[in-house]
């Protein structure tokens, strides 16, 4: 995801870039880190404030945030910098970049820095669902920071207009379709003026789709990240459901639905229900001029959503002193109080159960209970699709999904072709 930065501006904190021969002004270690912002917004101010707060408490370390690009652009920049010898000391990149970073020998596990009982307690404090994409081979390679799940948002006014209970979201695939049929409006000429539902299919189609495939009882890749199961009957069934919403039932826009404009369509009442990241929560709260609801995704054979978002990673090429300084910052920014503040200010899920026990978070969710939905969905959440050669393997699936949604291939053929391509790429890793 996530990645999936919300329209109002969410980002991926991407790493403290070690400048060639780290500057040590007055004995201070200067760690600049670039933070890719997908769409401009207030997130940069938050990160600047965190950097200033950390420096105040740790005067020997200078943090210099640099803002650039999306998650996808950032992983390319981070790996290019790694190959040229001046990589970021610390990065927040997608949790799904873990295998790629390990294969490139770009990162070190965090386990080497876990020395005290307090450190051990801290490492075991994160939600288990977020650690699935952070650990492999018995080691912890990433620390959850800005994490999310996919959730359903609905416009309560439009539900009421359609004769639906505004306080009750759809609970199943069948209800989701039934509600969407009631919520789709057409003018006298038969043109749609309001869609029942929108599931974006640009940017990260595989991530939204993973909600559907998980609900159909299918898992897209194995935990070792060296085998995919794209042509599984459950995967095909999930894709057929998505395709049918648009092509057969005509309650969902045809073709490719843009990631970035979906929240705007929701604000402008062009769509009554949308699937998007919980990272959009603050954005929706600020811009929806109507009462809205947030719910776990409707269940197919079972409930489910992928987790998403970014983890902290430590560069292998940084000096031990730089790594220690970066580790100190990671410990500092993931305390329950700061994780709670970050969640309240961005909409991302606070990464530890302890965050939800803080006074600030209790006050926030008492006023805004929708903020608990993503956390409550974690028990049925699965790891976001992550494999070796992740970008290529994911692209094979994205291409297949888009081929089916635009009608150029059947769901069955699209998934068979995607699986063949993923198999070709991953064979070498088994």
Image (cartoon, rainbow, N blue to C red):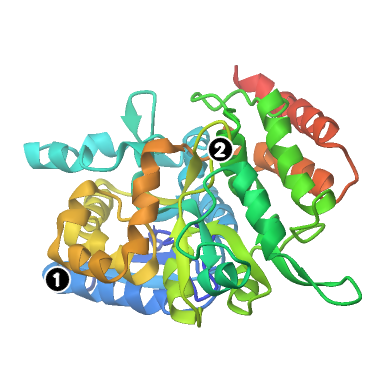
Closer to us: 429 or 166: 166
How far apart are labels 1 and 2 at the CA level? 40 Å
Q: Is residue 28 visible?
A: no
Residue identifier under label 2: 385
Residue pictured at 54% horizontal, 47% vertical? 83
Q: Position of residue 149 (x, y in %)?
A: 46, 50
Closer to us: 422 or 128: 128
**Total numbered badges shown on the rendered structure:** 2
Left or right of residue 222, residue 190 in this image: right
Left or right of residue 152, residue 112 in this image: left
Say which element carries label 2: loop
Residue pictured at 39% horizontal, 60% vertical? 348
Left or right of residue 423, residue 30 in this image: left
Q: Residue furthest bottom?
A: 289
Q: Position of residue 217 (x, y in %)?
A: 57, 28
Of circles 1 and 2, the one toward us is 2
Say which element carries label 1: loop
Closer to us: 41 or 425: 41
Residue pictured at 54% horizontal, 36% vertical? 386
Q: Is residue 289 visible?
A: yes
Residue identifier under label 1: 59
Left or right of residue 114, residue 404 in this image: right
Q: Position of residue 339 (x, y in %)?
A: 26, 59
What crowding class fits label 1: few (fewer than 14 Cα within 10 Å), some (14-19), or many (20 or more)? few
Q: Residue furthest front?
A: 163
- Does residue 318 sit above or below 229 in this rendering? below
- Does residue 302 sit above or below 278 in this rendering? above
State which tag comes first along the sequence, 1 or 2. Answer: 1
């Amino acid at each position: 995801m996530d990645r999936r930065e919300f329209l109002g501006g969410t980002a991926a904190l991407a790493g403290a870039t070690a400048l060639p021969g780290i500057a040590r002004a007055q004995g201070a270690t200067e760690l600049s880190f670039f933070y890719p912002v997908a769409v401009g917004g207030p997130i940069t101010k938050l990160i600047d404030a965190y950097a200033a707060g950390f420096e105040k408490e740790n005067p020997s370390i200078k943090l210099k945030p640099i803002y650039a690009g999306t998650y996808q652009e950032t992983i390319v920049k981070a790996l290019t910098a790694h190959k040229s010898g001046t990589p970021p000391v610390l990065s927040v990149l997608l949790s799904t970049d873990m295998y790629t970073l390990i294969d490139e020998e770009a990162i070190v596990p965090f386990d080497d820095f876990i020395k005290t009982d307090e450190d051990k307690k801290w490492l075991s404090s994160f939600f288990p669902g977020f650690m699935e994409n952070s650990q492999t081979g018995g080691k912890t390679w990433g620390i959850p920071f800005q994490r999310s799940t996919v959730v359903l948002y609905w416009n309560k006014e439009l539900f009421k207009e359609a004769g639906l209970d505004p306080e009750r979201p759809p609970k199943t695939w069948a209800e989701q379709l039934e509600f969407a049929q009631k919520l789709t409006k057409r003018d006298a000429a038969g043109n749609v003026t309001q869609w029942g539902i929108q599931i974006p299919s640009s940017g990260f189609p595989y991530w939204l789709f993973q909600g559907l495939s998980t609900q159909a009882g299918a898992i897209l890749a194995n935990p070792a990240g060296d085998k995919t199961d794209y042509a599984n009957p459950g995967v095909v069934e999930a894709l057929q459901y998505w395709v049918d919403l648009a092509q057969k039932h005509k309650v969902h826009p045809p073709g490719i639905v843009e990631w970035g404009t979906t929240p705007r369509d929701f604000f402008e009442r062009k769509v009554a229900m949308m699937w998007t990241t919980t990272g959009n929560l603050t954005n929706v709260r600020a811009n929806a001029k109507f009462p809205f609801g947030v719910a776990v995704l409707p269940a197919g054979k079972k409930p489910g959503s992928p987790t998403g978002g970014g983890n902290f990673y430590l560069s292998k090429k940084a000096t031990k002193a730089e790594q220690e300084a970066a580790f100190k910052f990671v410990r500092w920014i993931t305390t329950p109080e700061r994780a709670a503040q970050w969640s309240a200010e961005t909409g991302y899920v606070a990464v530890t159960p302890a965050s939800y026990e803080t006074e600030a978070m209790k006050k926030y969710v008492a006023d805004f209970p929708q903020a608990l939905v993503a956390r409550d969905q974690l028990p049925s959440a699965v790891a976001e699709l992550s494999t070796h050669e992740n970008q290529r393997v994911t692209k094979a699936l994205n291409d297949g999904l888009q081929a089916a949604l635009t009608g150029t291939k059947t769901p069955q053929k699209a998934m068979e072709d995607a699986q063949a391509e993923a198999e070709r790429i991953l064979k070498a890793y088994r």
